[in-house]
Image (cartoon, grey):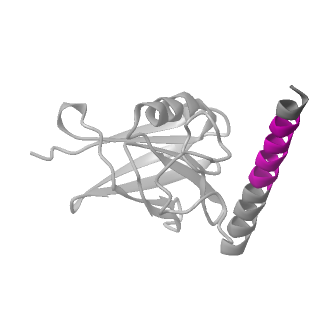
Amino acid sequence: MKTQRKQRGIVAAALCAALTLGLAGGVQAQQASEVTGGTTTDDSSAGNTNGGGLPQIQQQGDVSFVSGGVGLDESKALQHAQSQWPLSLRFTGPGSEFLADVHVRIVDAHNSEVLNTSSRGPYMLVRLRPGRYTVHASYKDREQSKAVTVQAKGSAKSAFYWNTN
């Protein structure tokens, strides 16, 4: 009985040590890559610091954004988080078909580009300063532009629809 407890303790200690080394290695790798908030090639929400199925938050200049929503958990997490972000964008096609790989470019009132990226799914949440912006969204060489006003409090929403038939 004592031998089994001792063996379990040794196994537990070895497991803790392995996990600690793995986590430390992951932190070192992230620091070495100098990427804040994930990478554009990271397609999963697993292991991120956001929790709840929310994809990794990306950073471009002083603008934070997150996009995705292809899977059910990620879609629900993004929908739930919309009220906490100043701008919420949705990209759909015929029959409310979710679209991904939508090129998004946001310019401010002075026509200065503040964001230039592609969406990983039908939802994109963007943290912008209060002001007036124009969102340019392109899907399969078809561009749409919409003006949005981001208030100091609350969340602006804009939906883009493409008839892909």
Q: Which stretch is magenta?
A: 6-20
Q: Quadrant of the N terminus?
A: top right
* Front one among 43 and 29: 29
Q: Residue at x 66, y 73 (%)?
A: 33
Seen in the picture, residue 160 relative to 113 is either above or below; the reply is above
Residue found 52% across the figure and 37% down from its top: 156
> Magenta segment: does it hold 162?
no
Look at the picture and state if 28 lies above or below 162. Answer: below
Instruction: Locate residue 93, reporting x and y percent.
Output: 22, 40
- Above or below, 111 against 92 in this view is below
Q: Front-most of 48 and 152? A: 48
- Could you tell me residue 85's position as x and y percent? 60, 39
Residue 74: where, in percent of width, then height? 48, 36
Q: Residue at x 38, y 46 (%)?
A: 121
Side of 151 where 22 appears, left or right: right
The quarter of the displayed image where residue 114 is located:
bottom right
Look at the image and say whether residue 7 sits in the magenta stretch.
Answer: yes
Q: Relative to 139, say whether 94 is above or below.
A: above
The kind of secondary structure the magenta stretch mainly shows is helix
Specify the quadrant that holds the C terminus: top left
In the figure, is residue 152 to the left or right of 142?
A: right
Which residue is at a point 63% across and 48% down the rendered structure image?
48
